[in-house]
Amino acid sequence: HTPSPVISAVSAKSYACQRRTPLKHHNLFLTEPLELLAENAELGENEGRSVAFRRAAAILKTLPLAVKRMEDLQGLPCLGDHSLRVVKEILEYGSSQEVESTRHSEQFQAMKALTGIFGVGVKTADRWFREGLRCPADVAKSEQRLNSSQQAGLLHHEDLSQHVSRAEADAIGQIVERAVQEVLPGAHITLIGGFRRGKETGHDVDFLITHPEEGKEEGLMPKVVQWLETQDLLLYQKTTRNSYLESKEGPARPPNNMDRFERCFSIFKLERRASGEAHSSAQATEGEPGGGEGRAPGPEPLPQRRPAGWKAVRVDLVVSPFSQFGFALLGWTGSKLFERELRRWAGREKNMSLSSHALYDNSKGCYLRASTEEEIFSHLGLDYIPPCDRNA
Ligand code: DCP
Ligand code: MG
């Protein structure tokens, strides 16, 4: 059996940043189970295992056809023994026992439900699980001490667990645009994250803000937040300052690049009027497993304020200096695996360190400047991949 030319072309490209990964593909019946195992590994803090499953899923997303037989996979990189075993079982029997038992396990479901609360990470969720808590309603009833983000997360959990539609993202975009123009005319805002990659729904809305005059962007975030607060548009916000400049770490050791910009994690109060379909889309995308009539058996709904007039929506705002804009844009467009693969490619194949602030050439001992994403791909010796094909 000789691999098809298409497979041969893909097989030379073992990094996701070398390939085009569209949003819609032909192998969801394989990638969904593999990504469930990846998620389970993440919830168990097994990062290596999680990345292995994600890489396996990502290669299958690039194939131009649905996989029918194991031979179709010959010569493909990124498929480890465990992933191959899962794929084989699905091809033969229609499902994988390991995947289905994980999907239905109490621990997986509880960890997913608990980390689904805004402000709750794996460590907290794990502690709560060991204390017997299984779902947000259990947490609400318990005597747990909650920090302010967790309190907001619980209070707005029902809204936040629903997908954000593109129309809602655009409505939020208009509000952010207005806020930013009020406090700093001439600033630019760009929709980043999943929506920039063409996703029709997201778990939040992400924006990158900059100003063409370097330095003008300094101190912008508190002013934007204050404006939003005076308009009663925020239900929660936590702002972190830009710590990149004060960072003592050398450039060769790239900073944990998500944390250094002036950034605001927030929950917006979106008037349902502001996006015509806020109401209906929230219901349409709920997609509870089990479906059918009424509620699926499971966690009881939380008691919470449920005014019909608005919906709580998670919004992330990031401010970048103009000189770093290309790096910030590339670093915040995702997907998370695509970002990871870009950094791995840079380090392993090019001896460079990429972050969402800069690109450093360790061999030459200098920074490589770039103002667009295209230039960064070119510095890295990669073909340009547009955002819609970064859905690894
Ligand atoms: N990001 C990253 N690594 C992280 C967190 C974020 O690379 N640990 C980058 C890539 C993401 C972007 O930031 O695409 C936004 O993060 P989100 O968690 O909002 O992810 P998405 O927007 O891609 O997905 P969703 O539709 O679920 O919001
Ligand atoms: Mg997002």
Image: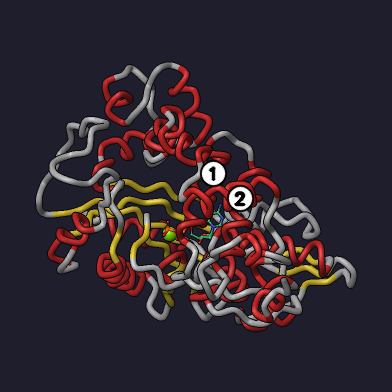
Q: In which quarter of the view is residue 338 placed?
A: bottom right
Q: Give the image location of residue 314, x and y in percent.
A: 34, 53
Comes first in the chain, label 1 or label 2: 1
Image quadrant where one finds the N terminus: bottom right
Kindly state the secondary structure of the residue where label 2 is placed.
helix
Q: Do tag 1 and tag 2 residues touch (Cβ < 8 Å)? A: yes
Alpha-carbon span between mark 1 and mark 2: 7 Å
Viewed as shown, does residue 177 lie left or right of 209?
A: left
Kindly state the secondary structure of the residue where label 1 is placed.
helix
Read off the residue under disc 2: 53
**Could you say which is closer to the camera, residue 251 or residue 331?**
331
Q: Which amino acid does label 1 sit on?
A: Leu
User: How many numbered marks have been drawn onto this rendered protein structure?
Assistant: 2
Which quadrant of the frame does ligand 2 lie within? bottom left
Q: Give the image location of residue 75, x and y in percent.
A: 73, 66
Q: Residue at x 59, y 59 (%)?
A: 337
Residue 374 shows in this picture? yes
Residue 37: give its label.
1
Q: Which amino acid does label 2 sit on?
A: Phe
Q: Give the image location of residue 281, x and y in percent.
A: 20, 61
**Could you say which is closer to the camera, residue 183 or residue 144?**
144
Residue 215 shows in this picture? no
Q: In which quarter of the view is residue 283 placed?
A: bottom left
